[in-house]
Image (cartoon, rainbow, N blue to C red):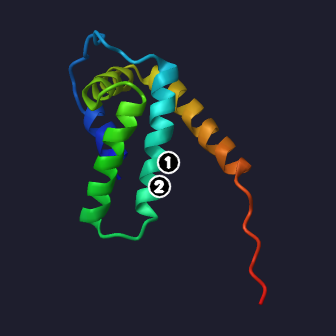
């Protein structure tokens, strides 16, 4: 949803951005991206209207950036930098996917309710 828009809009830029002054290190990018994807999944599964979902995601993402001691602007600049350096972004997303998969494995399986 929103992350796809961010990612693809950043990849369309023909000019290569310089290294931002406040470039988030890869490990922080991984943690933020994992949290953003989990937040996005929670919002999408909430069963609300698209407008409500967008408002929920925006509100939760502000809190998420605050928890990670950064801003959306710094995250976007870092994302743009890593997107232009494709190998870097591939490596970051490889860790993001592994982290989300590991969390999924740890989730308890739901047992059917017998009446």
- In the picture of the structure, the residue carrying the numbered disc 2 is 41
Q: Is residue 55 left or right of residue 1?
A: left
> Quarter of the image holding residue 48?
bottom left
Q: Look at 47% across and 55% down and name the residue there.
A: 41
Badge 1: residue crowd in 10 Å (few <14, some 14–19, many ≥20): few
Instruction: State whether residue 53 is above or below residue 70.
Output: below
In this rendering, position of residue 33 left or right of residue 65: right
Quadrant of res 25: top left
Q: Residues within 10 Å of mark 2 (few under 14, many from 20)?
A: few
Residue 76 left/right relative to 42: left
Determine whether, in the image, residue 105 is placed left or right of residue 52: right
* Tag 2 secondary structure: helix
Quarter assignment of residue 43 = bottom left
Separation of residues labelled 2 and 1 (CA atoms): 5 Å
Q: Kindly identify the residue that appears in the image at 36 percent across and 47 percent down.
A: 60
> Marks 2 and 1: CB-CB under 8 Å?
yes
Q: Which mark is residue 38?
A: 1
**What residue do we see at 35% from left, 53% from top?**
1
Q: Position of residue 17 (x, y in %)?
A: 25, 16
Residue sitting at x 28%, y 13%? 20
């Amino acid at each position: 949803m929103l992350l796809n828009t961010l990612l693809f809009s950043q990849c369309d830029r023909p000019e290569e951005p310089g290294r931002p002054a406040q470039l988030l290190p890869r490990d922080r990018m991984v943690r933020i991206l994992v949290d953003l994807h989990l937040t996005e999944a929670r919002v999408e599964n909430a069963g609300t209207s698209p407008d409500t979902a967008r408002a929920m995601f925006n509100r939760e993402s502000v809190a998420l950036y605050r928890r990670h001691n950064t801003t959306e602007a710094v995250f976007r600049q870092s994302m743009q930098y890593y997107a232009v350096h494709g190998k870097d972004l591939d490596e970051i997303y490889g860790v993001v996917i592994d982290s989300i998969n590991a969390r999924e494995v740890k989730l308890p399986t739901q047992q059917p309710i017998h009446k």
